[in-house]
Image (tube, rainbow, N blue to C red):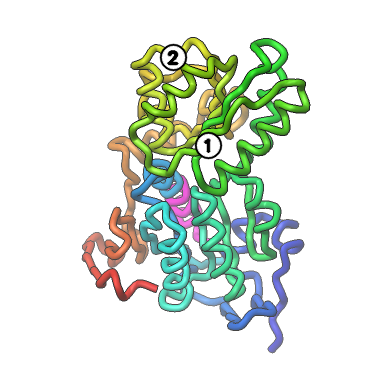
Amino acid sequence: MRGRQISRRSVLKGSLMASVIGGAGSFFGPWRQNHAWAQGAKPIKLGLTCDASGQYGNSGQDDFRGIKMAIDEINAKGGVLGRQVTFITADTETTPATGSRVAERFITREDCTILIGALHSGVANAITQVASKYGVIYMNTNSSAPSEAGENCSRVKFVWDGNGTNFSKASVKNAVDSIGKNWMLLTNDYVWGHTTSAATRTQVESAGGKILDNLLVPQNTRDFTAYLLKIQQAKPDVVATAVGGDDIKALREQVAQLKLDGKPAWINNQQDWPDVWGAPDSLFGVFGTTWYHKLPLPGVAEFVKKWQAANKDGRSRCRATSPTTATCPRANCSVRSSGQGRPTTSRSSRSSRT
């Protein structure tokens, strides 16, 4: 019997989550290895590629909490086409090599039908390569490098976060006109930082401003003294940062300590809410964000209440109503639920992960 082929177009026509998770038919692709996911009582298994450590560990766990809430809601309504949704997750460590190994294991050993997650754009691209090889759909939840929906796109990948170019267009021209034309860039030294600062440079120069310097910041930097001294010496009108995760929290705290938070002006291209609330006493300047929990829009207040109820202690409250694999901050450890409230822990050696 010949199954119906799922294409990007057919997925987008209906509910993305229901169509993809439900396995509306067999999925075939021109890849080295093909999978046909049969319908039936067997649960639908997702692979959640969420950071739990590294530069974006906090945001990765926020992603996990939101995904887990969606899974709980779907299962409470009977699942997808009568099938419950289960998941496995592992720490991708904000590292492309780890992301690649986790994705490979989820597909070839765990039989996951869909991969969901990633913050770091380099990690997302690594997962994309693995998903493309096997013809497995990958939902990139929160990577903001323009390249993720551009040169690193794939027919199996869906990207919906705003990117650095979007945020630059929203803030730069007005700042050039109202604050000043002399700018410095502070850039995380990886793909998101590079592409975001490149977009900022384009916007600054098209508005009649100029870039005095672009300071490259290695990932996981905690001491920004040398960079801030260069900024003090150059005396720019505006500093535009493309620095994320734990790095931006450390930077903000040191800027505030040196009382540089008033002048020059600061534009932080994008910040996730864990970065904001992780250091609330050092908020300053202008920053972009994809969503705000006080937006006066339908469904926002209801979602916030659900989020608060599910995460009272800052962690997702997993209900063991079906076999699941819950999160663990170590990439080589998983906590499995039997569906009867009896969690068991399994650990494999780091060298055995693929």
Asked whether 167 or 115 is in front, the reply is 167
Furthest residue in direction bottom, as rendered = 1
Tell me residue 155's x, y (percent).
Answer: 69, 65
- Circle 2 is placed at which residue position? 260
Report which quarter residue 224 is drawn in: top left
- Main secondary structure type of the part rendered in magenta: helix
Asked whether 263 or 353 is in front, the reply is 263
Is there CB contact under 8 Å for labels 1 and 2?
Answer: no
User: What type is the residue that disc 2 sits on?
Assistant: Leu
Question: Does the image show residue 336?
Answer: no
- Quadrant in which the C terminus appears: bottom left
Asked whether 114 or 146 is in front, the reply is 146
Q: Which residues are magenta?
A: 66-80
User: What type is the residue that disc 1 sits on?
Assistant: Thr
Q: Which mark is residue 155?
A: none
Question: Does the image show residue 240?
Answer: yes
Residue 19 is left or right of residue 337, and the answer is: right
Tell me residue 230's x, y (percent).
Answer: 46, 24
* Point 65% across, 58% down: residue: 152
Tell me residue 204's x, y (percent).
Answer: 70, 26
Q: Secondary structure at mark 2?
A: loop
- Circle 1 is placed at which residue position? 187
- Quadrant in which the N terminus appears: bottom right
Query: Callout 1 environment at 10 Å: few (<14), some (14 to 19), or many (20+)?
Result: many
Q: What is the distance, in whole Å, between disc 1 and disc 2 at their CAs?
A: 18 Å
Query: Callout 2 environment at 10 Å: few (<14), some (14 to 19), or many (20+)?
Result: some
Q: Is residue 186 magenta?
A: no
Asked whether 258 or 94 is in front, the reply is 258
